[in-house]
Image: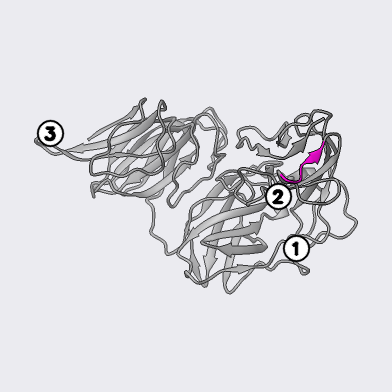
Amino acid sequence: YQRSQRTNCVYPPALGFKLIPIYDDRQELFVSKFDRDGKPVYSTLAGSACFDGLTGMALDAMGGVYLSGITNGGVFPLVNPVASAATYHVGKGFVARLDPTGSALTFSSYSSTGSPVIALTSSGDVVTAGGLSADVQLPRTNPSHAQIAVLAAPTPTSLRLNGVGNAFLRVNGPVSAGEIVALPVEGLPADFDFDSYINSRSPLASDMAGLRVTFDGQAAPLLSLHSGVLTAIAPQSLRGRSSTTIQVSYQGALSNTLIAEVRKSDLGLYSADGSGLGRAYVQNQDGTVNSPANPALAGSVITFFFTGAGENAAPVPDGSITPEHADLIDISTLSAGNLKILDVSPVPGFVAGLYMVHAQLPVFPPESITLVDSPWQRGSTSQTLSISVKRP
């Protein structure tokens, strides 16, 4: 076996696979297997869109290949993960397993050990050791600058929870109290979907035909299920916590558990197409939707929307509907570039967890917006969405 990282992303995988698109002039990791005569059996890329480094490798009794290392890149492929992490942050540890043919990942997760080395026990448990990895929170017996983690051998489940993150960002990451979150789940019936609607007139239920998602054992209100992505509201009980253990159940079947970091806030702007990219969904001062054909005027007030206010907002009952006259939230730590934030409040008549920002454009307005909670947004995806403006 050969394992390493490459700095020129044009390494040709032979008899292997490519997990996500590859870009030039980055660093990726690869694994190659050769027979006893030195002939290649397979060669495969494994990781994110570059910026991955390998620090350890181990073989199990079945011929599976365990990998450990760090990733600084984008979305790392997760399979039966045990931990969630912010999508972009320097030095996230990871542990993964390639099947004996090198054609698929059977396990892949972020790890709280940064730059981990790896070993296997006789029972198949995975042992990693290294420094603490920022933004990945596995349980620790005592806080320190180094850690040894033991992960039980992965147990196949009929349900697979493959991540969690801000539903408006559409990426894996941390969570905050009251945040609208998205959870990709495999193993649910293909024809099972529902939508309780974000402007529901009734409080959201936490059980839908036997489907539930729990945060530290507490069932969360369910918003929708489409194409295997479950949308829910993170419980208010996450306030003051640093991590949470998440699990999905469906008619008695349990998924793997997933540990996610809990932050005081985790902001994500609502985009026009719901992808978390491209254009922001913005209303101009007259209430019409912002577009290239209908730009906002310099100096006017625009309205845009987000989720993930977390502890900046007052606690409300889980799954409740925001009343007509809701309290404004603290904006002392929020910033939107050179837009002047006038106020931020929950959206009346919508599910609690959706917020709107009234902001004034400057005389020479930008053609994009961003929203940051300065003390708490460390390591999160940098989200900038475009808007249409008319300048003097």
Task: Name the amino acid type tagged 1.
Answer: Asn
For the N terminus, the image quarter is top left
Residue 83: x and y in percent read 51, 45
Answer above or below: position of 270 versus 375: below
Say above or below: 188 vs 162: below
> Which residue sits at x=86%, y=34%?
299
The residue to which callout 2 is attached is 177
Residue where numbered disc 1 is placed: 199
Circle 2 SS class: loop
Q: Which residue is mark 3?
A: 38
Q: Quadrant of residue 14?
A: top left
SS at badge 1: loop
The range drawn in magenta is 293-297
- Residue 15 placed where, x, y %? 23, 44
Q: Residue furthest right?
A: 325
On the image, the x and y values in percent for residue 95 come to: 41, 40
Give the label, 2 or 1, closer to the camera: 1
Residue 382 counted in the magenta span: no
The three-letter code of the residue at mark 2 reads: Ala
Residue type at the position of mark 3: Gly
x and y percentages locating residue 115 in the rendered image: 43, 29
Q: Is residue 335 left or right of residue 2?
A: right
**Residue at position x 67%, y 45% from top?**
241
Callout count? 3
Dots 2, 1 in contact, CB < 8 A: no
Q: Residues within 10 Å of mark 2 (few under 14, many from 20)?
A: many
- Between circles 1 and 3, the one closer to the viewer is 1
Rounded to the nearest whole Å, what is the CA distance between mark 1 and mark 3? 62 Å
* Residues at circles 2 and 3 in contact by the CB criterion of under 8 Å: no
- Local packing at callout 1 (Cα closer than 10 Å; few below 14, some 14-19, many 20+) is some
